[in-house]
Image: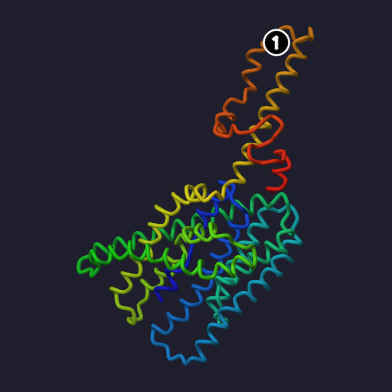
Amino acid sequence: MYGSIISATDPVAVVALLKELGASRRLATLIEGESLLNDGTAMVVFAVILDIVKGEDLTFGDIVLKFMRLSFGGPILGILAGIFLSFILSRIHNQAVLEVNSTISVSYIVFFVAESTSLHVSGILAIVCLGLYMTNSGKTHISAESEHAVHHVWGFIGFVAETIIFILTGIIMGQRATEAGTKIGAIDYALVFATYAILHVIRFVLLATHWPILRLVGYGMDFKQVILCSYAGLRGAVGMSLALIVAADKSGKIDEYTQDVILLHVLGVALLTLIINATTTGILVKKLGLSRQSDIKKNILVSIIDQLEENVQQNMNVLKEKRHFNNVDWTTLRASIDMKELREQFKRYENLHLDGNVEGIGKSGFETLAQVN
């Protein structure tokens, strides 16, 4: 049960950083997709094992059937909900409030139906498949004017939900760790650091073992990307949600010490990955050379800035010769359109010429940019 909880990853911070650094979009998609399926699988395994721990009399056949129901029932429900939501959105045009409310309502109803009715399928997998369907087919039914609103509202909801989970976990763990009679000792805190290290080793070994297969299928991976994926396995809201479920269990089948240790380890590992991994992933990306495409783009931008400054100066020289502009303060005008600040931002990207060529690259900057995109 602990393994299913701690295996759930949260790549939001890493994916945002990869996009900022200009790393491969395929790599960001691979990490994000792995997390989605990983979280869904962790939820399914957790639900099955939790029932066993609580003492339900399940045969091997019952376990297989429950696993199959959770694994396939959720995606089917999510796809059906996606078709229904697409139909609703296709009947709404330029109504941002209705479109946002439709996406929120359908998502909530789908999760409720999956988890709280007689269906008993995976709500996480249902929502994931609903999102995948909307991205692939249903997104076109959202009005262009409303897409911005939908994106920002869902971003805000995600931020608030994760914040609440972190706050609740911290409060509950702090209360349990400081109350009289707690069995949590120094060894339990030390094991948090050991668990953090072991998880990285396990993740790297599994990725390295399957690398020959990953290199040939899907997006393909080189060994540098394997190292980054191993390091980018942050833990977050999903794992802590499962730990809170264990901590809130009142069946008496899970002793209080086990509940406290699971909550402590999940929270501790999540904090360590956020403090260490999230803040140093950018350095690792640059050391591995996975942000090289971003450097090329910035080199091209410097070239464009040079060309713009040259055009500005040429046009000003032409205007100075016209008598209609005799009273113009050309010094003030030139200072107002100076690109010094932009140039300072890209000061270290000086290895190029005005024709757009980048050192070490035998193609023009614009041809390179086309290849990168």
Q: Where is residue 286 in the image (x, y as percent from the top left)?
A: 51, 47
Residue 269, image quadrant: bottom left
Which type of secondary structure does the marked residue at label 1 adopt? loop
Q: Position of residue 126 (x, y in %)?
A: 60, 72
Q: Left or right: 172 with respect to 303?
A: left
Residue displayed at 47% across by 78% down: 47
List x then y, in percent, for residue 310: 70, 23
Of 146 and 319, which appears nearest the observer?
319
Q: Name the residue under label 1.
A: 328
- Please give left or right for residue 302 compared with residue 258 in the image: right
> What amino acid is labelled 1 in the image?
Val
Q: Which residue is drawn at the image coordinates 41% and 58% (left, top)?
A: 166
Image position of 219 with respect to 61: above or below: above
Q: What residue appears at the point 57 percent right and 72 percent down from the top-left corner? A: 125
Where does the image place residue 178, in percent across and percent down from the top left?
24, 62
Relative to 104, say whether 58 is above or below.
below
